Image (spheres, coloured by chain):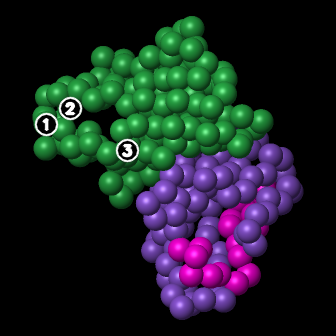
Amino acid sequence: GDSVTQMEGPVTLSEEAFLTINCTYTATGYPSLFWYVQYPGEGLQLLLKATKADDKGSNKGFEATYRKETTSFHLEKGSVQVSDSAVYFCAPQRRALTFGSGTRLQVQP
Amino acid sequence: SAVISQKPSRDICQRGTSLTIQCQVDSQVTMMFWYRQQPGQSLTLIATANQGSEATYESGFVIDKFPISRPNLTFSTLTVSNMSPEDSSIYLCSVERNEKLFFGSGTQLSVL
C-alpha cells in the first residue's frame, strides 16, 4: 500500500527563518499529494496540493513541488511566523489519504 | 468549502462501554471517511462510508468494533464499541468535495 516518510519533529525555528519539511512517499501510480496543517486546538486544514508531476502547490507563503523522480513533496516557506506554529502532515491520496507521521513546527519570536 | 459538524468534541468513557460519534455535513457528499489519530501518532484511515452500502474497512479495523452508519448523503456515525484504554484517540470524519478534503473538528476520546 501507499506509505509516507516525513521529517521528524519538533522543528524549532526563529521567526523569519527558512523552513523545509521533507516528505517522500511510495505509492502505486501517481497520486495527488497534499500538505495538511493542524493548528493547536483545531481540526485539520488543507494547506496546499499538487495533482501531477512538476506541479507546485502554494498557499499562505508555503510551497511544495511534486517531484516524480524523487517521489518527494517537500514543504518550504521562505520566512516563517509565530502563527505558523502547528503540526504539518504530508499525505498522498488515491482513494483516501495516507498520512505521514506529522511534523511539529515551533516558531519562536 | 464544506462545513462539517462533528460531535461530541470530547468524551471520557469507561472501559467496556460504547460511544457513537456523529458527523453532519452542510451538503450532500458521496464519500465520507473516518480517521483515528492516536496520541503521538499519525492519522490512520479506519473506513470509508458510502451511502446505501456497507462501509469499507481498512486493514486492522473491523465492523464489530467500529460500526458505521450512513443513512443519507449528509450524515454518518462511527461507533467505538466495547472500549478499552487503547481506543483513546482523536477520531475525525472527513469529506471530499471538488477534489479537496475537509475535516471535522475531531472527537477526543479518553477511555478509563
Q: Amino acid at mark 2?
A: Met
Q: Earlier in the sequence, mark 2 or mark 1?
A: 1
Residue B81 in the image: above or below residue B1:
above
Q: Which residue is mark 1?
A: B14
Q: What's the CA distance linking mark 3 and mark 2?
A: 17 Å
Instruction: Report the span colored magenta.
Output: A63-85
Q: Is residue B59 visible?
A: no
Q: Earlier in the sequence, mark 3 or mark 2?
A: 3
Relative to B55, A53 lies left or right: right
Colour used to depict chain B in the structure image:
green
Q: What's the CA distance linking mark 1 and mark 3?
A: 17 Å
Q: Pointers 3 and 2 in contact (CB under 8 A)?
A: no
Q: Which residue appears farthest toward the right when viewing the image? A: A54
Residue B83 disc label: 2
Q: Residues within 10 Å of mark 1 (few under 14, many from 20)?
A: some
Q: Pointers 2 and 1 in contact (CB under 8 A)?
A: yes
Badge 1 and badge 3 both on one subunit: yes
Q: Name the residue at 40% across, 26% down.
A: B78
Q: What's the CA distance linking mark 2 and mark 1?
A: 7 Å
Residue A68 in the image: above or below residue B54:
below
Residue B57 in the image: above or below residue A36:
above
Q: Secondary structure at mark 3?
A: loop
Quadrant of the snapshot with the N terminus of chain A: top right
Q: Earlier in the sequence, mark 1 or mark 3?
A: 3
Colour used to depict chain A in the structure image:
purple
